[in-house]
Amino acid sequence: MDMTKETLAEIRKNIRRAKKSEFYKKHFAGIDPEDVKAEADFLKLPFTDKEDLRNAYPLGLCAVPEERIVRIHSSSGTTGTPVIIPYTRKDVLDWAKMFKRCYEFAGVTAKDKIQITPGYGLWTAGIGFQLGAELLGAMALPLGPGNTDKQIKMMIDMGTTVLTATSSYALLLAEEIAKRGVKDKIRLKKGVIGSERWGKKMRKRIADELGVELYDIYGLTEVYGPGIGINCMHDAAMHMWTDYMYYEIIDPATGEPVKEGERGELVITTLQKEGAPLIRYRTHDLTREVLGKCACGQDYPRIAAIDGRSDDMVKVKGTIIFPSRVDELLSGVDGVSSEYQIMIDHVNGKDVVTVFFETARKSDGERRDLEKTVEREFKVSVGMTPKAKAVGMGELPRSEKKTPRIFDNRY
Protein backbone atom coordinates (compact mmCIF):
# COMPACT_ATOMS: atom_id res chain seq x y z
CA MET A 1 0.00 0.00 0.00
CA ASP A 2 1.10 3.60 -0.52
CA MET A 3 3.01 5.23 2.32
CA THR A 4 1.89 8.80 3.06
CA LYS A 5 3.66 11.44 5.15
CA GLU A 6 0.99 10.92 7.80
CA THR A 7 1.67 7.16 7.87
CA LEU A 8 5.41 7.78 8.18
CA ALA A 9 4.78 10.09 11.13
CA GLU A 10 2.65 7.37 12.79
CA ILE A 11 5.38 4.78 12.15
CA ARG A 12 8.03 6.99 13.75
CA LYS A 13 5.74 7.43 16.77
CA ASN A 14 5.22 3.67 16.88
CA ILE A 15 8.98 3.01 16.82
CA ARG A 16 9.41 5.37 19.77
CA ARG A 17 6.70 3.45 21.64
CA ALA A 18 8.11 0.06 20.70
CA LYS A 19 11.62 0.93 21.88
CA LYS A 20 10.29 1.19 25.42
CA SER A 21 9.95 -2.62 25.41
CA GLU A 22 12.85 -4.86 26.32
CA PHE A 23 12.54 -6.68 23.00
CA TYR A 24 12.69 -3.65 20.71
CA LYS A 25 15.41 -1.96 22.79
CA LYS A 26 17.63 -4.80 21.58
CA HIS A 27 16.02 -5.52 18.20
CA PHE A 28 16.17 -1.85 17.16
CA ALA A 29 19.39 -0.93 18.97
CA GLY A 30 21.07 1.90 17.08
CA ILE A 31 17.91 2.77 15.13
CA ASP A 32 16.69 6.36 15.54
CA PRO A 33 13.01 6.83 14.68
CA GLU A 34 13.79 10.29 13.28
CA ASP A 35 15.96 8.68 10.60
CA VAL A 36 12.88 7.01 9.08
CA LYS A 37 12.03 9.90 6.74
CA ALA A 38 10.92 7.99 3.64
CA GLU A 39 9.62 4.60 2.57
CA ALA A 40 13.16 3.54 1.60
CA ASP A 41 14.28 4.15 5.20
CA PHE A 42 11.35 2.12 6.50
CA LEU A 43 12.22 -0.80 4.24
CA LYS A 44 15.67 -0.98 5.83
CA LEU A 45 14.18 -1.75 9.25
CA PRO A 46 14.56 -5.39 10.32
CA PHE A 47 11.57 -7.70 10.23
CA THR A 48 10.01 -9.10 13.40
CA ASP A 49 9.08 -12.80 13.32
CA LYS A 50 7.13 -15.11 15.60
CA GLU A 51 10.30 -16.70 16.95
CA ASP A 52 11.37 -13.24 18.12
CA LEU A 53 8.11 -12.93 20.03
CA ARG A 54 8.57 -16.37 21.60
CA ASN A 55 12.04 -15.33 22.75
CA ALA A 56 10.49 -12.25 24.39
CA TYR A 57 8.40 -14.46 26.73
CA PRO A 58 6.78 -13.59 29.06
CA LEU A 59 6.50 -9.77 28.86
CA GLY A 60 9.48 -8.66 26.84
CA LEU A 61 7.12 -7.09 24.29
CA CYS A 62 5.44 -4.88 26.89
CA ALA A 63 6.04 -1.23 25.96
CA VAL A 64 4.19 0.42 28.87
CA PRO A 65 4.41 0.08 32.66
CA GLU A 66 2.79 -3.22 33.70
CA GLU A 67 0.14 -1.40 35.76
CA ARG A 68 -1.30 -0.10 32.46
CA ILE A 69 -1.88 -3.65 31.14
CA VAL A 70 -5.49 -4.73 31.56
CA ARG A 71 -5.33 -8.09 29.74
CA ILE A 72 -3.03 -10.56 28.06
CA HIS A 73 -3.73 -12.91 25.18
CA SER A 74 -1.65 -15.69 23.72
CA SER A 75 -1.34 -17.23 20.28
CA SER A 76 -3.17 -20.50 19.68
CA GLY A 77 -0.02 -22.46 18.78
CA THR A 78 0.27 -25.85 20.49
CA THR A 79 4.04 -26.25 20.40
CA GLY A 80 6.96 -24.26 21.70
CA THR A 81 7.04 -21.24 24.00
CA PRO A 82 3.77 -19.29 23.80
CA VAL A 83 3.62 -15.72 22.53
CA ILE A 84 2.20 -13.38 25.18
CA ILE A 85 0.60 -10.17 23.91
CA PRO A 86 -0.27 -7.49 26.52
CA TYR A 87 -3.16 -5.04 25.94
CA THR A 88 -3.81 -1.62 27.46
CA ARG A 89 -7.34 -0.28 27.96
CA LYS A 90 -6.95 1.69 24.72
CA ASP A 91 -5.83 -1.43 22.84
CA VAL A 92 -8.96 -3.28 23.96
CA LEU A 93 -11.20 -0.37 22.93
CA ASP A 94 -9.45 0.03 19.57
CA TRP A 95 -9.92 -3.68 18.92
CA ALA A 96 -13.62 -3.40 19.74
CA LYS A 97 -13.95 -0.43 17.36
CA MET A 98 -12.31 -2.38 14.54
CA PHE A 99 -14.51 -5.39 15.21
CA LYS A 100 -17.65 -3.22 15.23
CA ARG A 101 -16.56 -1.89 11.84
CA CYS A 102 -16.20 -5.47 10.59
CA TYR A 103 -19.77 -6.26 11.60
CA GLU A 104 -20.99 -3.08 9.91
CA PHE A 105 -19.19 -3.97 6.67
CA ALA A 106 -20.97 -7.34 6.81
CA GLY A 107 -24.32 -5.57 7.17
CA VAL A 108 -24.79 -6.66 10.79
CA THR A 109 -26.81 -4.21 12.92
CA ALA A 110 -27.89 -3.68 16.52
CA LYS A 111 -31.03 -5.70 15.75
CA ASP A 112 -29.04 -8.87 15.10
CA LYS A 113 -28.41 -11.77 17.47
CA ILE A 114 -24.81 -12.95 17.16
CA GLN A 115 -23.94 -16.51 18.21
CA ILE A 116 -20.27 -16.71 19.15
CA THR A 117 -18.76 -20.19 18.79
CA PRO A 118 -14.97 -19.52 18.72
CA GLY A 119 -13.03 -20.19 21.91
CA TYR A 120 -12.54 -17.87 24.87
CA GLY A 121 -9.63 -17.62 27.30
CA LEU A 122 -6.12 -16.79 26.15
CA TRP A 123 -7.18 -17.17 22.52
CA THR A 124 -8.35 -13.84 21.07
CA ALA A 125 -11.26 -15.15 19.03
CA GLY A 126 -14.38 -15.43 21.19
CA ILE A 127 -13.89 -12.30 23.26
CA GLY A 128 -13.12 -10.25 20.15
CA PHE A 129 -16.39 -11.27 18.50
CA GLN A 130 -18.18 -10.41 21.74
CA LEU A 131 -16.51 -6.99 22.19
CA GLY A 132 -17.51 -5.93 18.69
CA ALA A 133 -21.07 -7.18 19.10
CA GLU A 134 -21.56 -5.32 22.36
CA LEU A 135 -20.09 -2.07 21.00
CA LEU A 136 -22.40 -2.41 17.99
CA GLY A 137 -25.34 -2.89 20.34
CA ALA A 138 -26.27 -6.33 19.02
CA MET A 139 -27.26 -9.24 21.26
CA ALA A 140 -24.24 -11.47 21.89
CA LEU A 141 -24.80 -15.17 22.57
CA PRO A 142 -21.35 -16.18 23.92
CA LEU A 143 -21.58 -19.97 23.74
CA GLY A 144 -17.93 -20.62 22.91
CA PRO A 145 -16.82 -23.83 21.21
CA GLY A 146 -18.37 -27.28 21.24
CA ASN A 147 -21.63 -28.75 22.57
CA THR A 148 -23.28 -28.86 19.16
CA ASP A 149 -26.64 -29.92 20.64
CA LYS A 150 -26.75 -26.75 22.71
CA GLN A 151 -25.50 -24.61 19.82
CA ILE A 152 -28.37 -25.73 17.59
CA LYS A 153 -30.96 -25.46 20.38
CA MET A 154 -29.90 -21.88 21.17
CA MET A 155 -29.81 -21.05 17.48
CA ILE A 156 -33.44 -22.14 17.18
CA ASP A 157 -34.78 -20.87 20.51
CA MET A 158 -33.04 -17.49 20.43
CA GLY A 159 -33.52 -16.87 16.72
CA THR A 160 -29.81 -16.36 16.03
CA THR A 161 -29.28 -14.27 12.88
CA VAL A 162 -25.47 -14.19 12.70
CA LEU A 163 -23.11 -17.14 13.23
CA THR A 164 -19.46 -16.52 14.06
CA ALA A 165 -17.17 -19.54 13.74
CA THR A 166 -14.15 -21.13 12.18
CA SER A 167 -14.97 -22.50 8.75
CA SER A 168 -14.48 -26.03 10.11
CA TYR A 169 -17.07 -25.60 12.85
CA ALA A 170 -19.46 -23.74 10.55
CA LEU A 171 -19.36 -26.76 8.23
CA LEU A 172 -19.89 -29.17 11.13
CA LEU A 173 -22.94 -27.16 12.28
CA ALA A 174 -24.29 -27.00 8.73
CA GLU A 175 -24.01 -30.78 8.37
CA GLU A 176 -25.67 -31.38 11.76
CA ILE A 177 -28.55 -28.99 10.98
CA ALA A 178 -29.14 -30.79 7.67
CA LYS A 179 -28.89 -34.22 9.34
CA ARG A 180 -31.46 -33.26 11.97
CA GLY A 181 -33.82 -31.70 9.44
CA VAL A 182 -34.17 -28.41 11.33
CA LYS A 183 -33.04 -25.95 8.67
CA ASP A 184 -36.56 -24.50 8.45
CA LYS A 185 -36.33 -23.56 12.15
CA ILE A 186 -33.05 -21.67 11.74
CA ARG A 187 -33.15 -17.88 11.27
CA LEU A 188 -29.53 -17.34 10.27
CA LYS A 189 -28.83 -14.62 7.70
CA LYS A 190 -25.07 -14.19 7.85
CA GLY A 191 -21.92 -16.04 8.81
CA VAL A 192 -18.76 -14.21 9.89
CA ILE A 193 -16.02 -16.78 9.50
CA GLY A 194 -12.36 -16.61 10.46
CA SER A 195 -9.28 -18.29 11.94
CA GLU A 196 -8.32 -20.50 9.00
CA ARG A 197 -8.03 -20.55 5.24
CA TRP A 198 -10.98 -22.10 3.44
CA GLY A 199 -11.49 -22.99 -0.19
CA LYS A 200 -14.31 -22.09 -2.60
CA LYS A 201 -15.97 -25.49 -2.29
CA MET A 202 -16.12 -25.30 1.49
CA ARG A 203 -17.45 -21.73 1.32
CA LYS A 204 -20.20 -22.76 -1.10
CA ARG A 205 -21.22 -25.77 1.02
CA ILE A 206 -21.54 -23.68 4.19
CA ALA A 207 -23.42 -20.88 2.41
CA ASP A 208 -25.82 -23.28 0.67
CA GLU A 209 -26.48 -25.58 3.62
CA LEU A 210 -27.00 -22.75 6.13
CA GLY A 211 -28.63 -20.39 3.64
CA VAL A 212 -26.42 -17.45 4.64
CA GLU A 213 -24.19 -14.71 3.26
CA LEU A 214 -20.59 -15.41 4.28
CA TYR A 215 -17.96 -12.88 5.32
CA ASP A 216 -14.26 -13.64 5.71
CA ILE A 217 -12.85 -11.88 8.78
CA TYR A 218 -9.09 -11.55 9.20
CA GLY A 219 -6.75 -11.16 12.13
CA LEU A 220 -4.05 -12.68 14.30
CA THR A 221 -3.36 -12.59 18.02
CA GLU A 222 -0.10 -10.72 17.59
CA VAL A 223 -2.01 -7.84 15.93
CA TYR A 224 -5.06 -7.46 18.22
CA GLY A 225 -6.83 -10.64 17.03
CA PRO A 226 -9.60 -11.22 14.47
CA GLY A 227 -11.21 -8.00 13.31
CA ILE A 228 -8.40 -6.11 11.55
CA GLY A 229 -10.01 -6.70 8.15
CA ILE A 230 -13.10 -8.17 6.46
CA ASN A 231 -14.66 -8.39 3.02
CA CYS A 232 -17.84 -6.49 2.18
CA MET A 233 -20.94 -7.62 0.29
CA HIS A 234 -19.50 -6.39 -3.01
CA ASP A 235 -16.34 -8.48 -3.21
CA ALA A 236 -14.42 -11.37 -1.63
CA ALA A 237 -11.34 -9.16 -1.08
CA MET A 238 -10.85 -7.98 2.50
CA HIS A 239 -10.74 -4.31 3.47
CA MET A 240 -7.89 -3.63 5.90
CA TRP A 241 -8.18 -1.01 8.67
CA THR A 242 -5.19 1.09 7.71
CA ASP A 243 -5.93 3.73 10.34
CA TYR A 244 -4.67 1.12 12.82
CA MET A 245 -1.97 -0.63 10.78
CA TYR A 246 0.31 -0.34 7.77
CA TYR A 247 0.82 -3.43 5.64
CA GLU A 248 3.33 -4.59 3.05
CA ILE A 249 3.39 -7.62 0.78
CA ILE A 250 6.85 -9.14 0.33
CA ASP A 251 8.51 -12.01 -1.44
CA PRO A 252 8.81 -14.56 1.40
CA ALA A 253 12.12 -15.84 0.03
CA THR A 254 13.91 -12.50 -0.43
CA GLY A 255 12.04 -10.13 1.90
CA GLU A 256 11.75 -7.61 -0.94
CA PRO A 257 8.43 -5.93 -1.84
CA VAL A 258 6.52 -7.68 -4.63
CA LYS A 259 5.16 -5.82 -7.64
CA GLU A 260 1.67 -4.32 -7.39
CA GLY A 261 -0.97 -7.04 -7.37
CA GLU A 262 1.53 -9.92 -7.05
CA ARG A 263 1.11 -12.67 -4.46
CA GLY A 264 3.39 -12.60 -1.45
CA GLU A 265 3.58 -12.62 2.34
CA LEU A 266 1.67 -10.07 4.40
CA VAL A 267 3.78 -7.95 6.78
CA ILE A 268 2.07 -5.68 9.32
CA THR A 269 3.22 -2.67 11.32
CA THR A 270 0.85 -1.45 14.03
CA LEU A 271 0.18 2.30 14.20
CA GLN A 272 -1.87 2.71 17.39
CA LYS A 273 -1.04 -0.27 19.60
CA GLU A 274 0.33 0.60 23.05
CA GLY A 275 0.83 -2.64 24.97
CA ALA A 276 2.82 -4.54 22.33
CA PRO A 277 3.51 -2.43 19.23
CA LEU A 278 4.93 -4.40 16.31
CA ILE A 279 7.09 -3.21 13.44
CA ARG A 280 7.34 -5.12 10.17
CA TYR A 281 5.82 -8.28 11.65
CA ARG A 282 5.91 -11.23 9.25
CA THR A 283 2.51 -12.91 9.42
CA HIS A 284 3.53 -15.68 6.96
CA ASP A 285 0.02 -15.36 5.47
CA LEU A 286 0.02 -15.39 1.67
CA THR A 287 -2.13 -12.91 -0.22
CA ARG A 288 -1.97 -10.11 -2.78
CA GLU A 289 -3.10 -6.52 -2.89
CA VAL A 290 -6.36 -5.98 -4.78
CA LEU A 291 -6.00 -2.83 -6.83
CA GLY A 292 -8.67 -0.27 -7.60
CA LYS A 293 -11.57 1.01 -5.54
CA CYS A 294 -14.23 -1.35 -4.23
CA ALA A 295 -17.81 -0.99 -5.44
CA CYS A 296 -18.84 -0.26 -1.84
CA GLY A 297 -17.12 3.13 -2.18
CA GLN A 298 -14.94 2.75 0.94
CA ASP A 299 -11.33 3.94 0.78
CA TYR A 300 -9.85 1.17 2.94
CA PRO A 301 -7.42 -0.79 0.71
CA ARG A 302 -8.02 -4.48 0.10
CA ILE A 303 -6.12 -7.74 0.08
CA ALA A 304 -7.28 -11.03 -1.42
CA ALA A 305 -8.53 -13.76 0.91
CA ILE A 306 -5.61 -15.56 2.55
CA ASP A 307 -4.76 -18.59 0.42
CA GLY A 308 -2.06 -20.22 2.50
CA ARG A 309 1.00 -19.63 4.63
CA SER A 310 4.61 -19.38 3.60
CA ASP A 311 5.46 -21.78 6.46
CA ASP A 312 2.74 -24.42 6.01
CA MET A 313 4.23 -26.09 2.96
CA VAL A 314 5.69 -29.57 3.01
CA LYS A 315 8.28 -30.96 0.62
CA VAL A 316 7.97 -34.50 -0.76
CA LYS A 317 10.43 -35.91 -3.29
CA GLY A 318 11.56 -32.36 -4.06
CA THR A 319 8.01 -31.17 -4.69
CA ILE A 320 6.45 -28.47 -2.51
CA ILE A 321 2.83 -29.04 -1.45
CA PHE A 322 0.68 -26.13 -0.25
CA PRO A 323 -2.80 -26.86 1.17
CA SER A 324 -4.12 -23.87 -0.80
CA ARG A 325 -3.02 -25.49 -4.06
CA VAL A 326 -4.74 -28.74 -3.10
CA ASP A 327 -7.92 -26.79 -2.27
CA GLU A 328 -7.82 -25.22 -5.69
CA LEU A 329 -7.29 -28.42 -7.66
CA LEU A 330 -9.94 -30.38 -5.74
CA SER A 331 -12.47 -27.57 -6.20
CA GLY A 332 -12.22 -28.20 -9.93
CA VAL A 333 -13.08 -31.90 -9.71
CA ASP A 334 -16.81 -32.56 -9.93
CA GLY A 335 -17.98 -35.02 -7.29
CA VAL A 336 -15.24 -34.20 -4.76
CA SER A 337 -16.41 -32.40 -1.61
CA SER A 338 -14.57 -29.67 0.29
CA GLU A 339 -13.14 -32.07 2.89
CA TYR A 340 -9.80 -33.81 2.40
CA GLN A 341 -6.70 -34.95 4.26
CA ILE A 342 -3.18 -35.66 3.06
CA MET A 343 -1.12 -38.33 4.81
CA ILE A 344 2.63 -38.44 4.18
CA ASP A 345 4.44 -41.59 5.33
CA HIS A 346 7.92 -43.03 4.87
CA VAL A 347 7.60 -46.69 3.83
CA ASN A 348 10.48 -48.95 2.82
CA GLY A 349 12.78 -46.00 2.24
CA LYS A 350 10.26 -44.05 0.12
CA ASP A 351 7.91 -41.15 0.82
CA VAL A 352 4.28 -42.12 0.17
CA VAL A 353 1.52 -39.50 -0.19
CA THR A 354 -2.13 -40.48 0.23
CA VAL A 355 -4.93 -38.01 -0.48
CA PHE A 356 -8.23 -38.89 1.23
CA PHE A 357 -11.26 -36.99 -0.06
CA GLU A 358 -14.98 -37.15 0.61
CA THR A 359 -17.58 -37.80 -2.07
CA ALA A 360 -21.30 -38.46 -2.16
CA ARG A 361 -20.89 -40.99 -4.95
CA LYS A 362 -21.61 -44.53 -3.82
CA SER A 363 -20.59 -47.02 -6.50
CA ASP A 364 -17.11 -48.52 -6.51
CA GLY A 365 -16.72 -47.67 -10.20
CA GLU A 366 -17.55 -43.99 -9.73
CA ARG A 367 -15.18 -43.75 -6.78
CA ARG A 368 -12.34 -45.39 -8.71
CA ASP A 369 -12.88 -42.93 -11.57
CA LEU A 370 -12.74 -40.03 -9.12
CA GLU A 371 -9.55 -41.38 -7.55
CA LYS A 372 -7.89 -41.57 -10.97
CA THR A 373 -9.03 -38.03 -11.76
CA VAL A 374 -7.65 -36.67 -8.48
CA GLU A 375 -4.33 -38.46 -9.04
CA ARG A 376 -4.11 -37.03 -12.55
CA GLU A 377 -5.01 -33.48 -11.48
CA PHE A 378 -2.59 -33.67 -8.57
CA LYS A 379 0.20 -34.64 -10.97
CA VAL A 380 -0.62 -31.73 -13.31
CA SER A 381 -1.09 -29.09 -10.59
CA VAL A 382 1.38 -30.12 -7.88
CA GLY A 383 3.95 -32.07 -9.86
CA MET A 384 3.72 -35.50 -8.26
CA THR A 385 1.31 -38.42 -8.23
CA PRO A 386 -0.22 -39.44 -4.88
CA LYS A 387 -2.43 -42.39 -4.06
CA ALA A 388 -6.01 -41.01 -3.96
CA LYS A 389 -8.63 -42.62 -1.73
CA ALA A 390 -12.34 -41.74 -1.87
CA VAL A 391 -14.37 -41.95 1.34
CA GLY A 392 -18.00 -41.23 2.14
CA MET A 393 -19.40 -37.88 3.23
CA GLY A 394 -18.70 -37.19 6.89
CA GLU A 395 -16.05 -39.91 7.25
CA LEU A 396 -13.13 -37.53 7.69
CA PRO A 397 -12.80 -35.89 11.14
CA ARG A 398 -14.48 -32.55 11.80
CA SER A 399 -13.09 -29.92 14.14
CA GLU A 400 -14.56 -27.26 16.41
CA LYS A 401 -11.46 -25.14 15.77
CA LYS A 402 -9.12 -25.49 12.81
CA THR A 403 -9.12 -28.64 10.69
CA PRO A 404 -5.61 -30.01 9.99
CA ARG A 405 -5.17 -30.91 6.31
CA ILE A 406 -1.65 -32.32 6.03
CA PHE A 407 -0.25 -34.97 8.37
CA ASP A 408 3.47 -35.53 7.90
CA ASN A 409 4.28 -38.82 9.64
CA ARG A 410 7.87 -39.08 8.38
CA TYR A 411 9.53 -37.59 11.43
Image (cartoon, rainbow, N blue to C red):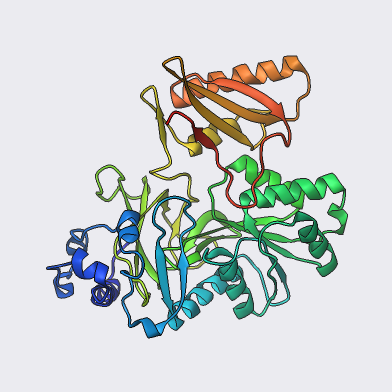
Reply above or below: 410 against 127: above
Residue 96 place in picture, x, y as percent:
53, 76
Q: Nearer the viewer, residue 277 or 375?
A: 277
Please identify the residue farthest to the bottom as the structure is shown. 67
At 60% from the left and 52% from the top, the residue drawn is 401
At 12% from the left and 68% from the top, the residue drawn is 30
Horizontal side of 92 relative to 56 (left or right) equals: right
Horizontal side of 131 relative to 220 (left or right) equals: right
Q: Nearer the viewer, residue 380 or 195?
A: 195
Residue 293 place in picture, x, y as percent:
46, 60
Horizontal side of 206 relative to 349 (left or right) equals: right
At 27% from the left and 77% from the top, the residue drawn is 17
How many numbered circles are shown? 0
Reply above or below: 295 against 173: below
Which image quarter holds the N terminus? bottom left
Which image quarter holds the C terminus? top left
